[in-house]
Image (cartoon, rainbow, N blue to C red):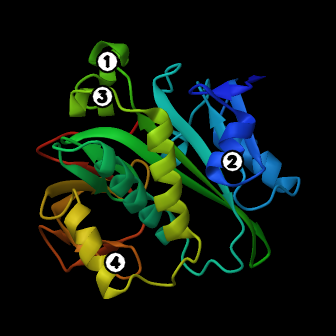
Amino acid sequence: MSRKASRWEGQTIQALRERWDRPNIHLHSLIDSTNEHAKALADDGAPAGTIVLADMQSGGRGLGDRSWYSQKGAGLYLSLVFRPQELANPLLVTLLAGLGTARAVESLVRGPRVSVKWPNDLIVDDRKAGGILSEVSWQGSAVNHLVLGIGINVHNRSDDFPEPLRDIAISLDTASGRTVSRLELADQVLDEVEDRCANLPEALDLELLREFDDYDWLRDRRCAIETSPGSAPVRGTAVGIGPDGALLFRPDKGALQRITAGRIRAEELALPDY
């Protein structure tokens, strides 16, 4: 299901093209998923920098195909097309995009702590305010395209969220106590994310590791990790992020582990994925 739009946040497509300095912008009042549409466009040859932006998603997705609540007019639902020549470490895409998104939000929401929960969650005031979804298309060992989806709760009130999410989700308006502009947020997100993901490194250098340390919500928290669906959770403490983007996890029993995939729950503050 898809309905195209001619404006977003009072801006025409032409105004947004000029504002963001690119010709390929696709606006929708309703779409199943901005990522799905961006992937289809990329498969048809859409260039790097193509943007898909929606006012509402009927089938928004998060990590592991979990659903993403996409209320009409309440969030930023945006996908970007990248065409990297090489992609040595796909895990870093999500982490760098998350860091850029956190910096963008922090520039507009002053006061509440803005953090990143490995690997893809935006946390504001200890609640989930957004998420990142990166999807890579390969041709053999070569990258065809990369699509990066960003969803952020902006105008939602607490009782707008479905009942299971009301204690774990938050919007930027609620966190900041004021109305945050979705247009200004998109400006900042595009600047930060494209800057960080234009030339993806093979590993995080010392400067990036220190920056992640400042935003790492899981750092020094007690966690339970399921490394595969249905597996027994392993309990321990998150102790940081490695140069390859892996979560460094010290279990209660055993040696330090590098986690590259899995479901992580902080035990003192339950933040299930959605």
Pointer 3 with pointer 1, Cβ within 8 A: yes
- Which of the two labelled residues, at mark 4 and mark 2, occupies the earlier sequence position? 2
Observer able to see residue 233: no
Query: Considering the image in quadrants, where does the C terminus appear?
Result: top left
Pointer 2 with pointer 3, Cβ within 8 A: no
Q: Residue at x 37, y 61 (%)?
A: 99
Q: Which of marks 2 and 3 is in front?
A: 2
Determine whether 263 is above or below 163 in the image. below
Q: Residue at x 79, y 60 (%)?
A: 47
Seen from the viewer's position, the closer of residues 49 and 254 is 49
The residue singled out by tag 2 in the image is: 18
The residue singled out by tag 3 in the image is: 173
Query: Considering the image in quadrants, where does the N terminus appear?
Result: top right
Q: Which of marks 1 and 2 is in front?
A: 2
- For disc 2, the neighbor class at 10 Å (few under 14, some 14 to 19, many from 20) is few
Q: Is residue 155 left or right of residue 54?
A: left
Pointer 1 with pointer 2, Cβ within 8 A: no
Seen from the viewer's position, the closer of residues 175 and 43 is 175
Observer able to see residue 273: yes
Determine whether 129 is above or below 8 in the image. below
Circle 3: residue type: Asp
- Which of the two labelled residues, at mark 1 and mark 4, occupies the earlier sequence position? 1
Seen from the viewer's position, the closer of residues 151 and 231 is 151
Circle 4: residue type: Leu
Q: Residues under labels 3 and 1: Cα distance?
A: 8 Å
Determine the image quadrant of residue 268.
top left
Q: Residues under labels 2 and 3: Cα distance?
A: 27 Å
Circle 2: residue type: Glu
The residue singled out by tag 4 in the image is: 208
SS label for mark 1: loop
